Structure formats: structure tokens, C-alpha cells
Amino acid sequence: MSLSALWLLPAAAALLAACCGRQARAVALGAAAATLGMSLMPAWAGLDSLSRLSYAGPAWFYGIRYSVAVDGLSLPLLWLTAFLTLIVILFSWRGRFSSGYWAAFLALEAALMGVFLMRDLFFFYLFWEAALIPMFFIIGLWGSANRRHAAVKFFLFTFAGSVLMLLGFLVIVTQHHLATGVWTWDMELLKSPRPGGALGLASFLALVVGFGVKVPLVPLHTWLPDAHTEAPVGGSVMLAGVMLKMGVYGFLRVAIPFFPELCWRLLPWLGGVAAVGVIYGALCAMAQQDLKRLVAYSSVAHLGFCLLGIFSRTQEGLAGGSLQLLNHGLTTGALFLLVGALYERGHKRGLSDFGGLAGRAPWLTFFFGVSIFASIGLPGLNGFVGEFMSLAGMMVRLPVLALAGVIGVTLAAAYALPAFSAVFLAEPGEGSVSAMISDLSALEALTLAALVLPMLAIGLHPGPLLALLRSGVGGLAL
Amino acid sequence: MSSFLPIEALAPQLALAAGVVAALLAGMLKERPRGLLRAVAVSALLAAALLAGASLPSAHPPLLRLDRIGLCWQELFCLGALPLAVLMEEDEIPVALLFGSVLGMGLLAAAGSFLTLFLGLELMSLPAYLLVSRGRREEEAREAGLKYFFAGSTAGALFLLGMTLYYAASRSLALAPASGPLAQAGLALMGAAALFKIGAVPLHFWLPDAYEAADPEVAGFLSTSMKAAGVLLLMRLAELAPSSALARVLPAFGVMTMLAGAFLALRQQRLQRLLAYSSISHAGFMILGVGAWAAQGATGAGAAAVYYYLIAYLFMSNGAFAFLKTSGLSTRAQLRGYAQREPRLAALLAALLLSLGGVPPTAGFLAKLLILWETVRCGLYGAALAGALAALVSLGYYLALIRDAYFEPAAGQPPPAALRRHSSGERLVLLACAIPSALLGFFPWLAGGLAGVLSGL
């Protein structure tokens, strides 16, 4: 089986779904399930033989060449993408959506799979940007009240970052050609020689901004709360679950391997920005009255943890940071689905609009509780492993930043637990819509169970996944 | 064999001239079969394109010289005129005018001396003034046509003056390098004429009016073939003296043009005017590309980047104007809720707009990438940054149009022109423009092939 099928299949299915009207839903389900199955096949065949799956086409133009590969870093992200797409499709199953909705999610999946598969900077960029188009339509067409503004803001903001990143790529490729006389866009070959001096610094910063908008790093994060809040449930899940990961993946795949020394020299700055993100995101989340906005801001904080671990460049930090990517995809995905379920029933999202749901909707409460605890890093659930390892990694390098991270963990409990208690445990107040909230349907419960099980599994037995991730990112350690 | 007027070098132009005669003859028929003129128009343009494609580079001094760039551009002119040939009204006069204009462009591309260059320039411009003046909204069209005529004549006069100065320096009308202050001044004046034709800021003031008052399909022709001719003229001048002052200021002109066009387009409410300003912004990218090509000695693959940009823009711009013609919409307010009414046309529009905005994987993305790449290659990092900024700003208004069409609810009744049935020709043109616009970015090797053709591999 060729790796290209992982993006070709959803892309073809998206075209099919766009054309076939009523059956689009079934096409989407089938394609998403098949893609997930295919993405799991490399694991079946044995993880030692991942490198044998890679494929590189002929060089086309100035060294641009189609090439795909997987390793211990991209394979779990492919799983996450395929898994969350399937979950989103199942969760929207009963919604009355036009065929465009299903096509858009399949197109999004194709683009995201492409980002994690491509090993040529040109194609990497192509898919990176192409992912914006379906998400733009998902937010703008099926989002909530302020969706139009949020969709355009999201597109322009991330496009601005990516164009800078593209200029960075162009400088790297051109300088490589000047130094070696060879045109190439290949990620491996471009690592040396790389531009030095002011030009090197400028192109590194361009990459940091490009990836940083996506992560998001704190001064560049302002698109996120709007986009996450206004997007439909499925859109929020894919945004937070996968698209934010693209930024961190970019750091791991491009920025750090291309500029290891610069990254090391700027560690106090980069790590500082990540730590600010952890604290700032948590403080913002504490101030939110809207449940969805709260989850959105918590993403800013959680991605900060990932970056703290990764920038530390220790074995623990790298593995923990990349594990935290997957964890965040699972927990935030579950939280967005649950908030979506609440909104669908009560048409409200405010913390004070609910109360006492624990008695009315036990399953909803259970899943929400597990996800919230996973998100704040309770031992035994997945979040703990990732955050602990990330902070342990940073502790070796810059203890101050690790300390900031620890404060961030405490703050996470300080915004998540009151929110949980306000919605599920407190007495319903005036104007509460709790009476309208029914428990999860069987299908919803099933999809959430599918999300919660891996949380438990990773929390209790992270070894195999960590080993896989370490094989992908361990080489970046100092 | 060398004759004074070599037939084989002028074959595409002869095909077009035959087309003029055929169109005028067909106009004299009492009962003309429907679609006859359209068939004549399309087949003559295709024949000219094929003949240009089949020609080999050769020199025919003193007047003509066929090189690879010229031949490639001749094909471009013919292809850029095809949508107009399909969409225009069934009348012999505009068909003849269109052929005349394309013929002039062909002459410009095949020019081996300043004399032919000037002849081509005027021959391509005169019919264009008339095409604009014949717009459906008569008052406005006549006024804009006049304005276009005066601006164009000024450009022609500038060119003549520059030519004279250049002649004084080089003592020959041949397109050959010359040095000295007179030659520099002559080049600068002729360059100004070319920038006038392309619509570079600050020589762009005539352009929005002309594009807005003309019929949309005519505006499409002006923004593609006509701009391509201006770009070719600029390249011929830069070729003569790659290190001249003219060549060195081109990137600055490009940056100014792309930024001014993008910012001016942001506030436009009338669609055709918006596209006119956006065409100014795109022209900035082309000029920047020519500047980068000149900075690398006016040889090599840099020309391929400009050529690719023109090809991509040929599809995008002709498609966008064809959409205006097909849909009958004229303001942004009328665009609201369009996707509910016409989902298919709206999807084509979205593809065209994303391509104009340069979002991967569209053709517009690869075009912008190639230009920025050439800019980075010659070390113009500031210009590359400005290009990125212009791309971002222009994406702002393209996205706003998609937002109008897709996300906003319909406001009021659609205009009467929008309720008309679309002809099959209109649908064909839209499809033929939108599909390449959307997907060419997936095929970077096409651009590689172009580079090979242009540098004679």
C-alpha cells in the first residue's frame, strides 16, 4: 500500500461527496473509516520497517519533487488526524448538513494528512495552505453567529504567517543552491549547509512566525479564540485537535532540524514565549464565562507545554512534548464535542446557564469529568504523562521556565474545576437551561468512549507510544 | 533566404489578417448563419496560436526577429483573446477590431527594430480604444474610451520621443545595445510608455475607468493579452540594457504597483472596478518579475516565471471577468447569497478568486511563488517581503467576495441581468478558465517545461 493513498483517498472521496448529494454522509463515513484503517496498517506491518514505505518521485522543477514518508513522529499524527475525522463525522451523523459539509471535512483530512506525509518543502507548503480552504468554509458556512468575521480573520491571520514562512523556505532553498550548486526542496538534504549570519536568523524567525501563528505562540494567537468559538463542533475539534499540531510539527520537522544552533541560542526567548503562553492562556481561560471560549484558551496554554518540552531538546522533553500533542488532540477534541452536545441541547454555552447536570445527564458528566481531569493532568490519565515529561525536560535546561509551567498546571486546575462544578455540580440558577439537557445518545456516548479509552490507555501504559515518538524525535536531542 | 518581408515569419499575423477579411466579408452576408462569426474568430485565433507554436526562431533583418520569448508570447496573446472571441456579440466590427489588436501584439513580439515595435504598439492599441468605447453602457463607455485614447496616445508619444533619443545615441533603429546618457534617457521614456500600457502606478489612472466602462469580456482581454504585450515591451527594453537605470528601478515600480493596487481595491464596491484595481496589483508582480529577470542579466529561467504568471493570470482574470459577464452582477451587494442561488457558478467563482489570491494549490499560488523566488534569488529581500504583504492584502478582498457570495444571506432581488439564462459558450469559457486556475499549482513541472522552452533547451 502506498502512503499517498492516505491523502488521495479522502481527496477523491471529497470530490465524490460534493457531487453525490444525499449519499455524501455515507461516502464520508466510509472514506474516513478506510483512511483510518490504512493509516493503522504500517503499525500492523511492524514499526521497524517504516522507512521502507517512503516514496520519492522524479525531480520536476528546480528540485521540487513529490516525496512522502512516515516516521515515529508523523505516524501518530496521521492516526490522530484520521481518528478525529472519523469521530467528527460520527458525531455530526444526525445533523442535517448539506453534502458540502461532508466534502469539506474529507478535503480537510486530505490536506492535513498531506502535511504530515510530505517530505518536500514545496509540497509541505502546498498542503499546509490548502488545509485553510476547507476550514475557511467550515467556519464560515456552518459556524455560529459571528462566523463570517471569524472565518476571514482565521484565513488572513494564518496566511500572513505562512507567507513569511514561504519566504523563509525560498531563502533556505536559494542559499542551499548557492552553496552547493544543487536545487532541492528535500527536507533532509536542505539541513546542510544552511544559511548563516543575518540571513539565517531572518529565515529562522520567518519560520518561527509561520509555525508560531499556527501553534499559536502568544502574541500571534488572537485568531484562535474567535475561530475556535465560532466554528461548528466538528470544525473546533479539527482546529484544536489537528491544525494546532501542524505548528508544533513544523517546529519539530523543519525549524529545529534546519537551525539547531539558532534554536538553542534563542532557547530563553523561545521557551520564554512558550511559558508566557502557558500562563497567559490559563489566565484568559479563568476569565471566560463562555464554556467553548474557555476550552479554546486552554488550548493556548496546553500547546505552550508542548513547546516547553520540545524546546528543551532533552529526550524526555521531546518525547513528552510530542506525546502532549496527541493528548491535547484527544482531550480537547472530547471537550469540544461535549460543549457542542450541551449547546445543541440548550442553545447556550455560558457557565452560568447550566447547573446540576450531574443528576440529569450522568454519561455527559462522566465523559466531561474524565476529559477535564485528563486535560489538567491528573495522574493515571494521558495529560499527566505528557506534561510531566515536558516539564521534567525543561527543568534540566531552564528551571525558571519549568517553574512557570508548574504554575500553569495549577492554574489549569483553577479554571477547569470551577467550570466543571458550575456546570455539573452547582445548583441551577435563574434562567438555567439545565431542564433542556438530556443525556448523550448511544451514538454520541460511543464516539466519546472511543476518545476516552485512549486517554486511559496512554495514561496507564504510555510506553509503546513513547518509544514510537522517541524514534521520531529523539534525534533532535542535544 | 532573406527577403524584405518574409512570409513564414509573419504566418500567425497573416492568419489574423485573413480573419479580419473573413469577418468583414461574413458581415456583408444578408442572412448570416448563427455562430458563423464566432467560429471564424475562434478558428483564426487558434490557427494563429498554432502557427506561432510551430514557428522556429529565426532572424529577418532589418525589421523582424523571431525568438523563443516572442513566439511564446504570441501564443499567449491569441489564447488570452479566445474568451473574448467566444463571449463577444455577433457583430463583424468588434471581431475585426479584436483581430487587429492581436495582430499588432504579434508584430510587437516579432519586432527586430524599433520601427516594428512602434508599429505593433500602435496597431494593438487603436482597436482597443474602440473596443472600450463600444461598451454597453454607452455614455460611460465613450468617456472612458476617450480617456483611454488620450492616455494611450501619450504613451505612444513618449515611446516615439524615447525612440528618437535612442536613435540619436545608436544611429540605428535596430534593437541593439547602446550606451551613453541619450540612450539611457531614451530607454527610460520608452519604459515609461510600457509601464503606461501595463498600468503601473503612478501611470495607472486611466485603467480603472477603462476597465470598468468596457464590457467585462473586453476588460478580460485588456487585462491579459494587452498587459502581456506591455510586459513583453518592457522585457525587450530591459533586454537591451539589463544594467540600465530603467532595469534597476523596475522592482521599485513593481512593489509600488502591487501595493497601491491591492490597497486601492480593498474599498471598491463595484465588482468590475475591484477587478481592475486587482489587475493593477497583479501587474506589479509581473513588473517585479521583469525587474528580477533583468537583474540576473535578462537571460535564463527568470523569463519563465513572468511567463507562467501571465499564463496563470490569463486563466484567472479572463475567468473572473467572464463570471461578471455570465452572472450579470455588478456590485458586491448583489453578490450576497449568490451561492444559494447558483451553487455551481459560485464554486467556479470561489476557485477563481482563491487562485487570484494565490492560495495553494491554485495556479495563482505557483505564479506568485515563482516571482517571489526570482526576487529572492537576486537578493531583493525587501521587494520579496513587499510582495508577501501585497499578496496578503489582496487576499483580503478576494476572501471578502467569497464571504459575500457564500456566507451572507441574499439581500433583495437579484438584478434583472442576473436572471437571464447562461449560454453554453459562457459556461464553457468559465469552466475552461476556472479548472486550470484551480489545479495548475499541483503541476510544478509545467513551469519547469516552460523554463526549458524559453531558454531553448
Image (cartoon, rainbow, N blue to C red):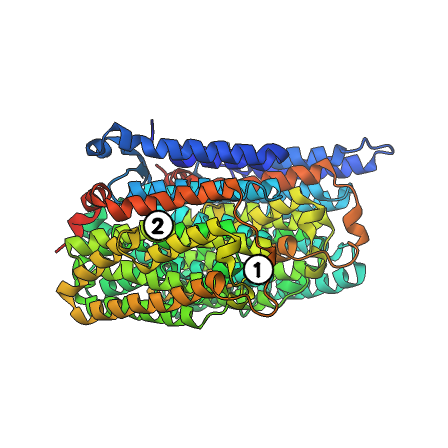
* B226 vs A57, nearest the viewer: A57
Which residue in the protein does label 1 denote? A434
- The answer to whether one can see residue B48 in this image is no
At horizontal 19% and vertical 52% (from top left) the residue drawn is A179
Q: What chain is tagged by disc 2?
A: B
Mark 2 lies on residue: B299
Q: Looking at the image, do the residues carrying marks 2 and 1 touch, with CB atoms under 8 Å apart?
A: no
Q: What's the CA distance linking mark 2 and mark 1?
A: 73 Å
Q: In which quarter of the image is residue A117?
A: top left
Closest to the observer, A407 or B361: A407
**Residue at the image position 63 percent from the left and 34 percent from the top:** A22
Quarter placement of the C terminus of chain A: bottom left
CA neighbours of label 2 inside 10 A, class few (<14), some (14 to 19), many (20+) = some
Q: Where is residue A247 in the image (x, y as percent from the top left)?
A: 34, 55
Work out whether A279 lies above or below A89.
below
- Total number of numbered discs in the rendering: 2
Q: What amino acid is labelled 1 in the image?
A: Ser
Q: Judge from the rendering whether residue B219 lies leftward or rightward of residue A165; answer left or right.
A: right
Residue A198 rendering spot, x and y as whole percentages: 23, 67
Which quadrant of the rendered structure holds the N terminus of chain A?
A: top left
